[in-house]
Structures are given as C-alpha cells and as structure tokens.
Image: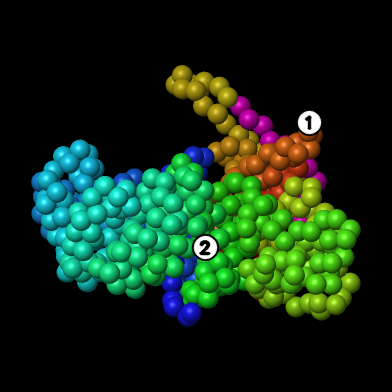
C-alpha cells in the first residue's frame, strides 16, 4: 500500500483551546516554522477576525517551504449573502491559499442551535464554498458533529457533505466533534460516505474524549479518507485532539502510507513545541517520549542489547528518538550526534569529546536543563565541549532592585533597576539601567556595557521570556528560564538558564544569548 495521506495540523487553533495554553504571536510563529520543518501539508493558523493574536499572526506569517497556510472560519450567516458576509470575507482577505470553513451536519443543531431550516443550512454551506472557490482558493469543509449527525439522520448528513463537495470543496472533513464515536463505527460510516464522495477528497478530524482519537483517525484512513487532521502532542479542548506525533509514524511505519513528514525530526519537534509552551514533555508518549524506548532490568537489558528488533516495535532513530538503556553510558548518543549534524558542527563520532558531551548533557538534563527548546544553548555547550568558545567579557557583580511606589501624580508604579560591573577588553566598567521588570533591566544594563566594544549588540533584543519551576528537588526547587532573542536581521534564537534563583537563571540565559549572538557576528557558524 503506497497511498498518500495529507497531514493537516490544527495546533494553532485547536491547541489554543487547551486549558493552560495561551499562544502569543511569537509562539504561533515558532510552532508554524517547526511544523514546516516536520513537513506538515497544511497549517491551520487560527481564526482571522476572532482575536487580535490571530489577526497579527496572519499579518506576519512566517515563510514556509513545505506547508500551506489555512485560515479557519465559518459559513456565511443566514441573514447575508456569501459575497457580503464580513466574517467569510475576512478569511479571504488574509490571503492564504487554503480556507477552511465549518458548518453543521447534525439536523438537531441546525434546527435548535442555528434555528434555521435544514435547507437554509445546506444553502449556507454550498454558497460559502462556491464563494471561496470563485476567489481561486482551495476550499476545505469541516463537517461538524458529522458522526453524531449521521447516526441521527444519515440522509441529511450525507446531503450536507455532498452539497459542499459539489460546490467545489477540495476536502470534505468528517468531524467527530464530541470525541465519542468508536473506531468500528468510524470505519463503518466512512465506508458508506466514500460511496458518495471519493476518499481522496475526504478527511477526518477526531477529538480524544474516549482516548480513541488516534484509533479513530487510523480507522478512517483504513476506510478510505486521505487527509488526517490533528495536533502535535494531542493538545486541544477537553481531552485533546488526535495526536499527530502518534498518527504520522503509525501511518508510515505500520500501515505503509506515504506522507510528506520527516520522521527523523519528529521527537525533537514534539519536545521543542512542548518546551515552547512551557509544558513538560510526556516521557511516556508513544514514539517521542523519553521512555518510549527505555529498558530497565538485567536480563531484559542484556537481551535488548543483543536483539533490539525483537524488543522494540520500531528502530528509535526512525522517529528521531534513542534507545535508553538506563544503566548504559550510550543513552542519548545517537540523538546528540544527529543534532550536531543538523547544526553543522564538525566532529569525530568516535572521539572522547563526543562521549564527554553525551555525559555532560545527561548530567545537565538531570539537574534541570532541557535543550530541545533551546538550540542556541545546546550549540554553545557542544562548541565548548568539542572546541573553544571565547570569553567575551568577565562579570564582576550585578544587583537588581524592584521598587513599588506611588509617583508624584499619585499613580502606583513598579520600577526595576539593574546595576552591573563587568570587565570588557581588560577595562572595568559599571552600568545602570531601568527596565520593564528585573530581567529587562538586567538585559539593558548588560548590553549597555558590552555594546561599547560589541556594536552588534545594540540591535539585539529580548522578545520572549518563560519561567518553569522544577519541583523534583524538594525545598531546593530549581528555576528554569527560557529566553528568545532576536536581532535586526530577523534572526531568532533560544537559550536557557537554570538556578535556584530566578534572577541568576535569567542572567545565565542572557549570557548564553549574548555569547551566541557575538559568535554569529564573528562568523563561527
């Protein structure tokens, strides 16, 4: 079986409905770039016109090489024509090649939620799709609550999706919106739908309320659909959406389907997105978890070493993961070697330096570091272990003060001031700077001092900052700080710092960021 399956990612919309996730524009831009690196076919960027974040994201779409951006919205309203509907035209105005609209396919929702006739609902869908196609865009129709609707009134549910298809929709996506349909029901119903609409134009969109979103998606593919919608790591409202980090490798490695995904990037991108969202990666996640290929126990470990294929369902490196023999020095070596190749650092795979780097990474990650979401920090660590990184300055001391008071106008204000002493090119100097918070003040003071010698730092700025408390150390809990920096050339890079003190951790991340920028300016990479 060599059929092509198209992967449609809705992380940037469905993921935003996850409890505890609140995307910034920078988050969405970063995730979109990671999805493109993975080879995702469609990236659903959000709902233009629904909120300022989505509006700004669509106004500043990152450049992609493999993916097609999709704008999501709804059909025209009952009281307007498609051409004059403001919401529908907002979707078209953002200029994406693909436009996805959602419509009702369950007759109960049409009459009780929309409070319109069944025929009017079909017209709304058909006319909206036709309007999108007329604007020379690829139309995608999400048939909301399709399986519930089919069970209640199969003739009407089919009428809805047939109308969308006849109006020109390239993809008709069958949605298990409640997440309550069973895999055998999915396969049976999809098998009936493909008699009316070709499977090469059908998609599946499953929610995970019975922990079967992955199984339901795969069942739909077995029955004939050729587009699968889901999210990275299964994020989404309630119990989440179908998890693409499980679906993609299963389709390719277990079921023989082709996708455009680069499987060897799967683990790194899965973890990088989790770190970006300030969420601890699930160590027990299938394919990409740190424990997915972990082995512990004497006889078992010995057997795995001799016959790994009989103890693991796939080779870990196929999905960018590594075998983790919990008593072995080699755990993680293949992953680090792959990262070195990716960022272009020359190395000898058999050298003692690689062994030291592997051990250093293991020790650091055990003490709170996480390098999947901080490529610049990993690169600096590798260059220090395998070669040399110059010392651009020496920190002598710093002090940060926060003051909360009423100003002369009686307004409550909070001020942060950083005082810093450094030695640059043999010359000691002290700088003071105020900022919007202690980290911003420290960043300004540090760059103020260093930019006297390193002019390129004047164009550098801190654009995002996240903090995570690592509680596994009891009362001595550690703080991990993650910083994203940028410069005038549009370059973005991420660094981390770890310390029991949040300001100290922040300084460590800032120092890494500045060092990476200076090395970049010297042409090291």
Residue at 48% over, 79% down: 1
Residue 400 lies in the magenta-colored region: yes
Classify residue 343 as left or right of residue 36. Answer: right
Q: Is residue 305 visible?
A: yes
Q: Position of residue 504 (x, y in %)?
A: 73, 42
Q: Principal SS element in the magenta part? A: strand
Instruction: Determine the image quadrant of residue 130.
Output: bottom left
The residue where tag 1 is placed is 475
Residues tagged 2 and 1 counted as in contact (Cβ below 8 A)? no
Tell us which disc is closer to us: 2 or 1: 2
The image's mark for residue 247 is: 2
Who is closer to the viewer here, 425 or 338? 338
Instruction: Determine the image quadrant of residue 93.
Output: bottom left
Q: Position of residue 45 (x, y in %)?
A: 39, 57
Of marks 2 and 1, which one's residue comes earlier in the chain? 2
Q: Which residues are magenta?
A: 391-403
Above or below residue 391? Residue 477 is above
Residue at 84% over, 62% down: 301
Residue at 74% over, 72% down: 309
Above or below residue 191? Residue 125 is above
Residue at 69% over, 58% down: 292
Who is closer to the viewer here, 389 or 349? 349
Q: Position of residue 177 (x, y in %)?
A: 37, 48
**From mark 2 to mark 1, how far is it between C-alphas?**
40 Å
């Amino acid at each position: 079986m060599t059929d092509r399956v198209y992967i449609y990612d809705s992380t940037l919309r469905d993921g935003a409905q996850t409890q505890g996730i609140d995307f910034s524009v920078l988050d969405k831009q970063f995730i979109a770039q990671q999805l493109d690196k993975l080879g995702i076919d469609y990236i659903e960027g959000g709902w233009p016109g629904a909120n300022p974040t989505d509006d700004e994201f669509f106004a500043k779409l990152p450049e992609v090489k493999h993916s097609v951006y999709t704008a999501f919205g709804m059909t025209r309203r009952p009281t307007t024509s498609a051409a004059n509907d403001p919401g529908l035209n907002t979707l078209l105005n953002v200029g994406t090649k693909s436009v996805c609209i959602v419509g009702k396919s369950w007759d109960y929702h049409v009459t009780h939620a929309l409070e319109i006739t069944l025929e009017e609902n079909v017209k709304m869908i058909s006319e909206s799709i036709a309007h999108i196609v007329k604007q020379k865009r690829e139309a995608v129709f999400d048939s909301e609550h399709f399986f519930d609707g089919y069970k209640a009134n199969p003739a009407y549910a089919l009428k809805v999706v047939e109308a969308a298809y006849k109006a020109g929709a390239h993809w008709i996506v069958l949605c298990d919106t409640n997440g309550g349909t069973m895999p055998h029901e999915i396969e049976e119903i999809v098998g009936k739908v493909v008699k009316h609409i070709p499977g090469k134009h059908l998609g599946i969109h499953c929610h995970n309320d019975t922990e079967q979103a992955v199984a339901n998606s795969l069942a739909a593919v077995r029955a004939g659909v050729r587009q699968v919608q889901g999210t990275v790591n299964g994020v989404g409202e309630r119990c989440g959406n179908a998890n693409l980090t499980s679906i993609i490798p299963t389709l390719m490695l277990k079921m023989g389907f082709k996708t455009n995904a680069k499987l060897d990037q799967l683990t790194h991108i899965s973890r990088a997105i989790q770190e970006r969202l300030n969420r601890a990666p699930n160590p027990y996640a299938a394919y990409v978890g740190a424990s997915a290929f972990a082995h512990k126990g004497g006889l078992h470990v010995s057997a795995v070493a001799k016959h790994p294929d009989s103890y693991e369902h796939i080779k870990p490196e196929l999905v960018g993961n590594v075998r983790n023999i919990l008593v072995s020095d080699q755990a993680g070596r293949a992953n680090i070697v792959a990262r070195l190749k990716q960022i272009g650092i020359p190395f000898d795979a058999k050298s003692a330096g690689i062994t030291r780097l592997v051990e250093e990474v293991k020790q650091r990650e055990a003490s709170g570091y996480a390098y999947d979401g901080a490529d610049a920090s990993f690169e600096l660590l590798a260059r220090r272990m395998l070669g040399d990184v110059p010392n651009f300055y020496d920190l002598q001391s710093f002090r940060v003060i926060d003051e909360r008071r009423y100003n002369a106008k009686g307004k409550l204000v909070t001020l942060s001031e950083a005082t810093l002493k450094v030695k640059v090119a043999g010359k000691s100097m002290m700088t003071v700077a105020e900022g919007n918070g202690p980290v911003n003040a420290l960043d300004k003071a540090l760059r103020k001092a260093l930019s006297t010698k390193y002019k390129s730092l004047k164009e550098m700025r801190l654009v995002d900052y996240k903090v995570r408390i690592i509680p596994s150390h009891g009362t001595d809990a550690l703080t991990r700080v993650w910083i994203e920096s940028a410069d005038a050339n549009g370059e973005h890079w991420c660094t981390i710092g770890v310390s029991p003190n949040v300001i100290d951790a922040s300084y460590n991340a800032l120092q890494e960021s500045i060092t990476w920028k200076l090395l970049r300016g010297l042409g090291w990479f």
